[in-house]
Image (spheres, rainbow, N blue to C red):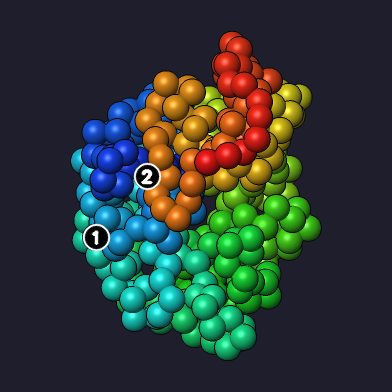
Amino acid sequence: MNLDGILLPVTTPFEPETSSLSAAAFAENLGRWLAHPIRGIVVGGSTGEAPLLDLEEICALVEWARAILPEDVLLLAGTGMESTRHTSRACLAAAERGADAVLVRPPAYYREQMTPEATRAHFLEVADRSPVPLILYHVPKFVPVGLAPELAARLVEHENIIGIKDSSGDLKNLGALGEACAGRAAVLVGSGAHLYAGLELGATGGILAVGLLATECCCDVFDAWRSGRTMAAGAGQEALGPLHRTVVVSAGVPGVKHALDLLGMCGGPPRAPLRPPGARTRARVEAALVRAGLLETAVAAGGDDVH
């Protein structure tokens, strides 16, 4: 499976009154993102509020996306659960509804028991049972069980484990993963601040939340790098870095959704216990969009972050 390019970890739009999934808003957003040459999308990822979704909801998102996406656009589903049994079932359910591959985080609730051997055994069993390929998900900010390069090297020996997304934001770790997986699995950048550097270090592409806002810029950076236009790639990266840090990192999912609203897309409210961004965060998000050239002017006032 060719994972080269930009994949988008799409947000999950909810109805404001009921917090149920909004099929219409989801379809509208996909139509906007598909206007750009993306390689694929991920439903049920971190930016999609995966821990707050039921498996039935993830499956619904897969079904809706499959009905909309062209055949050449990959559909990945986040299926990481706390038990090996539930993770395997989630992989099967997503595959049955049309997912091309699954993005699987390590279990972390009993993290002291999740030794490298326990983590390896978990992923190997899931890979054996999954009808579609696995992409490992290294996201230490949210999941405090690491996928060290040494462990990743052993895992990608399995023919059904085809890649790893590294959201550590650590370029040294990204480079080590590239060396560990070279020739056997793809490494995907998970930080919009490091797309260009990650490609230089051997990554084949990125799964980037900042790409939901600056889709064209992310695709341009990838295309410029692939065609050897390093100055153009570097210039694009200069715009992505601050936007990623201000919106994705500092403001989180509520900030990303607010940014989508400002861009005329369907952001909407996050699901509880997440809260909408306060006034100061909204102002920072708007200012970041203006600096990135995505909005003409910011309209929010400053003030305290009072929800």
Q: Amino acid at mark 1?
A: Glu
Instruction: Estimate how packed mark 1 is, as few (under 14), some (14 to 19) or many (20 or more) residues with alpha carbons within 10 Å.
Output: few
What residue would you read off at disc 1?
56
Secondary structure state at the residue bearing disc 1: helix
Examine the image and state in which quarter residue 288 appears: top right
Compared with 179, 84 (above or below) is: below
Asked whether the residues under the numbered discs 1 and 2 touch, taking CB atoms below 8 Å apart as contact, a structural biologist would say no
Q: Amino acid at mark 2?
A: Thr
What residue would you read off at disc 2?
12
Residue 46, image x and y in percent? 49, 54
Instruction: Estimate how packed mark 2 is, as few (under 14), some (14 to 19) or many (20 or more) residues with alpha carbons within 10 Å.
Output: many
Q: Is residue 34 visible?
A: no
The residue positioned 62% from the left and 38% from the top of the image is 305
Foreground pick, 93 / 3: 93
Secondary structure state at the residue bearing disc 2: loop
Left or right of residue 44, residue 192 in this image: right
Residue 178, image x and y in percent? 67, 59
The residue positioned 78% from the left and 58% from the top of the image is 172
Task: Report the Cα–Cα distance between label 1 and label 2.
Answer: 14 Å
Which circle's residue, 1 or 2, is located before the other in the chain?
2
Residue 213, image x and y in percent? 52, 30
Examine the image and state in which quarter residue 133 appears: bottom left
